[in-house]
């Protein structure tokens, strides 16, 4: 496990601009779990990870890895990266070009100080690591003669060979092509589950985050905006930023008319009539909110839905056939609504339609 | 309150004694000492009274004495004309070669490139010597030949003139101008030229309107560099200028220290002016190179520069350039080699009284002074190359990796000697260690100190360049894998940087073996180097044959080493190109 408390790290950019790369972040996860740091470019994910690794010295905060305090600015504790017992995979893989595949993986064992590894042990562990990432048989290759995917596996083998307490991954899949990326994603998840290794995964790819994580921390401007399981993050975003950044969402402006705490429901009056919504962040009657609904949760029909709730009318303005699904744009008068529908029912451009959504799939967000 | 204060102090001490910060402080002290202690000694000597027994009270008497005679006007005039003339002639010759090699389809480009690089092996002193054999009014064989052919009573050329000096130095430096301008011409944004060509202009119209303005920053910076080299040149003024009574700053600064009693005060007062001129030149040089970057002429890969099609002129142009190389490098070298096989003066094509002989070589190879000088020069060069490479390796690493905020400090210290001509470093180091209670005067160590100072900038440039090619994450991942700083250094950085370090080492080694301008101040009775014994032998009337053999014996190993360096560089280049191609494919 690891725990971060009130971590702060600033950089001075050219022109003496102070960048709060990490702005008072607290974070932690239980042993064996995978947490993803997700957010747009420049939001401080890598910096957080580098602070964990000890590659950056934070201005404030405390970091505990597997019950060892590795950083505590208040007490002046700072354990160097070499003594933190971590494995790390960089976005660039950082494979040492002057070594063979074997020597790359063996390096962490050769420099280990907690115990001495005999040659036989080194060999045994390196081969096991390489096998784990399906790179057995490549030991004697110069590291420069590997494909991108192989380099990436090699970087994993090197990160895992010492059986680290915690594995740090900085966008490890972003340099691979789409197909390979999906394949590696599955392998990575299986490997992590099998080894039961606590993992911090940095990405700005939301589908990667949803697929891999036990928990997601959504970052923006050096702060954590929301934390939760992939379902929570996806289903109950607490802000427009999260709703928009993860998946895509339609937003309707409205005002809360009524809150039913017991049912965890709110009724929001919009230009298209009342919408019944759930909420992640508590809202109060009279508050201005946005009603957010995901395109795949909206239904299209040519008849109005029964109770007149959670519905609006409009005209199909665009239609894109994608095979498994069809994307529609519906002109609702005050804006366009995106809908992802099954291709069974056909709607043609210009057709008047009714858009409906279940209250469980509508989220009221403070605006 | 007090405890708090103590806590802050303890924390400050803890920050300072982090190994990286200790290394930074150590580097600043060592490099700062090397660079600024001699400079301080030079200033101190200049602005205090010269009592004959070291500096006395503060005074401007040295300046009054040095600058109050008409002689100083001649000195200024000669130095400026010599440096400017050299810069212009060198630039024209080098620019011409660069243009032919890079922008025309004339053949033999790689040959010219190799020749230019090899020319770097030839010590300036020997070039000057060789030109005397070629163009001296008395003994120059070309003059003798001309007189014979055209029945002249007077020698048509004289090396002992301002023109002769300029030619001797320009012939030595034009490969440098070519090497500096070539890459710029190669990567010049051809789209701008093409745009002009497409709009109907002819190439000879594009040249002055588009190409030259684009090249202006590069031309300007190269000119400044050459001007500075001209200002700092010691060998040609010493060998050719002195007998011709054409004095320049470098020779005067040195001569003043050789007077009886030595006039250190005057020497340093003159040194101030030379230093000032060079500092100004470096200032503008840096500005020009910064602008050159802002000009962003580099457009990346994927284009072939338009080369002028010379058609039937391809070979004549190439042969013309080859002839130029022959004139500038071949003629003096061949003369030197020829002379080395005869005891007395032997003028090619004129005939010689004495017979062909190997005895000059036999003499030199058994000459104890030569053998001692080889030992001194080689060990000095090896030590200074090793020290510079080690020191600048650590400095470059700190500047780029560990403490980027303090990096500029190390950078500036390491690059300061660029503005210090060899004579200034020689004089300043001499003054400093005459004053300081450190017993290095008259030993090999004082030479070592001067050499390390002189070559700091070269080491720094090589190694920072190499280090920027190595991705920081390669070191970080080693750290995270559990490696200590020392292990990261020796197991990751050193092997990755080895070719660059080796190239820097060889380069500095060659420069140090060739060194003369600082050495003349610092040699002692037992510490002669190759440059100074060649000079002494020449000036004190060694036989022409022996002097030439001494030169040839120095040049041959240097050429072999430089060829080795070139081979190494090509290997590194090919390797990084292969890696880049691989990265693109993968
Ligand atoms: N060494 C540095 N010097 C100055 N500023 C830095 C440095 N490293 C990061 N920053 C700044 O800190 C902020 C956070 O950077 P960080 O690398 O953590 O972002 P990120 O979330 O990993 O982004 P990306 O998805 O693009 O990798 C950015 O604004 C960045 O410009
Ligand atoms: Mg990042």
Image (cartoon, coloured by chain):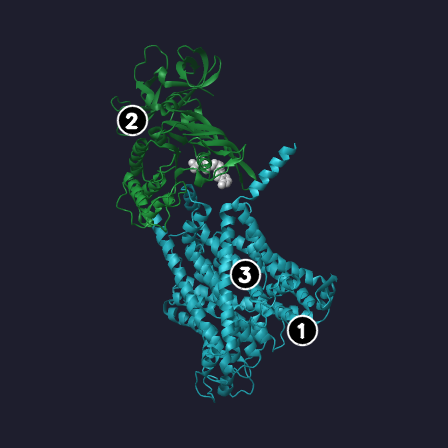
Chain rendered cyan: B
Residue that badge 3 annotates:
B452
Between residues A34 and B251, which one lies in front from this camera angle?
A34
Q: Is mark 1 within 8 Å of ligand 1?
A: no
- Crowding near the residue tagged with mark 1, few <14, some 14–19, many ≥20 C-alpha atoms within 10 Å: few
Classify mark 2: helix, strand or loop: strand
Q: Is residue B511 visible in the rendered structure shown here? A: no
Residue that badge 1 annotates:
B259
User: Picture coordinates of residue B23 (x, y %)?
Assistant: 53, 49
Quick check: do tags 3 and 2 share a chain?
no
Left or right: residue B273 versus residue B415 is right
| The quarter of the displayed image where residue B453 is located | bottom right
Residue that badge 2 annotates:
A326
**Label 2 to label 1: alpha-carbon separation:** 97 Å
Classify mark 1: helix, strand or loop: loop
| The quarter of the displayed image where residue B241 is located | bottom right
């Amino acid at each position: 496990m690891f725990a971060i408390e009130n971590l702060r790290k600033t950089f001075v950019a050219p022109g003496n601009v102070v960048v709060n790369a990490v702005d008072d972040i607290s974070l932690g996860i239980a042993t064996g779990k995978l947490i993803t740091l997700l957010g747009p470019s420049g939001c401080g994910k890598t910096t957080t990870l580098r602070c964990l690794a000890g590659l950056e010295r934070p201005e404030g905060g405390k970091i505990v890895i597997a019950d060892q305090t590795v950083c505590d600015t208040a007490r002046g504790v700072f354990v160097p990266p070499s003594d933190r017992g971590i494995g790390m995979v960089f976005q660039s893989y950082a494979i040492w070009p002057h070594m063979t595949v074997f020597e790359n993986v063996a390096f962490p064992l050769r420099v280990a100080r907690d115990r001495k590894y005999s040659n036989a042990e080194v060999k045994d562990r390196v081969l096991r690591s390489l096998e784990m990432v399906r790179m057995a048989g490549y030991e004697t290759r110069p590291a420069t003669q590997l494909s991108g995917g192989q380099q990436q596996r090699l970087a994993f083998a090197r990160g895992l060979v010492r059986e680290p307490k915690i594995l740090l991954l900085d966008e490890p899949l972003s340099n691979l092509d789409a197909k390979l990326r999906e394949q590696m994603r599955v392998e990575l998840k299986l490997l992590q589950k099998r080894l039961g290794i606590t993992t911090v995964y940095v990405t700005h790819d939301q589908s990667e985050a949803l697929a891999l994580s036990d928990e997601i921390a959504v970052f923006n401007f050096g702060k954590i905006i929301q934390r939760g399981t992939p379902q929570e993050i996806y289903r109950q975003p607490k802000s427009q930023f999260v709703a928009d950044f993860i998946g895509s969402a339609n937003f309707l402006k409205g005002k809360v008319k009524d809150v039913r705490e017991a049912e965890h429901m709110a009724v929001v009056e919009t230009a298209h009539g009342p919408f019944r919504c759930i909420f992640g962040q508590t809202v109060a009657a009279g508050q201005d909110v946005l009603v957010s609904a995901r395109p795949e949760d909206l239904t299209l029909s040519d008849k109005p839905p029964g109770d007149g709730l959670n519905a609006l009318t409009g005209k199909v303005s665009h239609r894109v056939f994608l095979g498994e699904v069809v994307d529609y744009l519906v002109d609702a008068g005050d804006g366009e609504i995106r809908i992802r529908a099954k291709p069974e029912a056909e709607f043609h451009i210009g057709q008047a339609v009714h858009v409906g959504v279940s209250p469980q799939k509508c989220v009221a967000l403070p605006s | 309150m007090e405890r708090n204060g103590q806590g802050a102090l303890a924390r400050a001490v803890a920050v300072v004694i982090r190994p990286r910060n200790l290394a930074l402080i150590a580097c600043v002290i060592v490099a700062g000492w090397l660079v600024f202690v001699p400079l301080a000694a030079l200033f101190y000597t200049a602005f205090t009274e010269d009592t004959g027994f070291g500096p006395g009270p503060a005074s401007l008497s040295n300046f009054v004495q040095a600058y109050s005679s008409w002689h100083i006007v001649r000195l200024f005039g000669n130095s400026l004309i010599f440096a400017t003339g050299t810069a212009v002639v060198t630039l024209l010759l080098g620019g011409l070669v660069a243009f032919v090699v890079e922008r025309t389809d004339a053949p033999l480009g790689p040959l010219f490139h190799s020749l230019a690089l090899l020319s770097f092996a030839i010590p300036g002193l020997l070039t000057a010597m060789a030109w005397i054999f070629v163009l001296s009014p008395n003994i120059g064989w070309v003059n003798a030949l001309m007189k014979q052919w055209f029945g002249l009573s007077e020698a048509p050329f004289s090396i002992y003139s301002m023109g002769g000096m300029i030619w001797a130095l320009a012939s030595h430096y034009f490969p440098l101008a070519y090497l500096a301008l070539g890459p710029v011409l190669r990567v010049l944004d051809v789209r701008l030229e093409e745009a002009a060509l497409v709009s109907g202009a002819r190439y000879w119209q594009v040249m002055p309107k588009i190409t030259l303005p684009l090249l202006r920053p590069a031309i300007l910076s190269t000119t400044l560099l050459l001007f500075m080299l001209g200002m700092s040149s010691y060998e040609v003024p010493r060998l050719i200028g002195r007998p011709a009574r054409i004095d320049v700053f470098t020779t005067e600064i040195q001569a003043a220290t050789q007077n009886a009693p030595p006039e250190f005060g005057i020497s340093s007062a003159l040194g101030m002016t030379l230093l000032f001129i060079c500092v100004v030149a470096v200032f503008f040089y840096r500005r020009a190179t910064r602008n050159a970057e802002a000009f962003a002429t580099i457009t990346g890969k994927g284009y072939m520069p338009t080369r002028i099609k010379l058609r039937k002129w391809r070979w004549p142009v190439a042969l013309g350039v080859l002839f130029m190389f022959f004139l500038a490098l071949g003629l003096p070298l061949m003369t030197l080699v020829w002379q080395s096989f005869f005891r007395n003066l032997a003028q090619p094509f004129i005939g010689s009284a004495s017979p062909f002989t190997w005895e000059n070589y036999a003499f030199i190879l058994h000459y104890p002074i030569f053998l001692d000088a080889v030992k001194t020069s080689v060990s000095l060069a090896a030590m200074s190359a090793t020290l510079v490479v080690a020191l600048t390796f650590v400095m470059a690493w700190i500047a780029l990796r560990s403490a980027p905020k303090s990096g500029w400090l190390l950078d500036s210290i390491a690059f300061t000697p660029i503005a210090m001509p060899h004579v200034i470093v020689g004089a300043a180091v001499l003054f400093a260690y005459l004053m300081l209670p450190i017993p290095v005067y008259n030993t090999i160590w004082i030479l070592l100190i001067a050499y390390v100072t002189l070559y700091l900038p070269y080491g720094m440039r090589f190694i920072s360049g190499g280090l920027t090619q190595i991705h920081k994450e390669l070191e970080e991942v080693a750290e995270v894998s559990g490696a200590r700083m020392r292990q990261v250094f020796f197991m990751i950085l050193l092997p990755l940087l080895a070719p660059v370090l080796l190239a820097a080492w060889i380069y500095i080694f060659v420069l140090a073996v060739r060194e003369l301008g600082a050495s003349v101040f610092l040699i002692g009775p037992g510490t002669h180097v190759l440059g100074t014994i060649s000079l002494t032998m020449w000036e004190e009337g060694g036989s022409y044959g022996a002097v030439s053999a001494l030169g040839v014996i120095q040049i041959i190993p240097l050429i072999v080493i430089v060829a080795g360096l070139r081979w190494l560089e090509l290997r590194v280049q090919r390797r990084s190109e292969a890696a880049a191609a691989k990265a693109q494919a993968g």
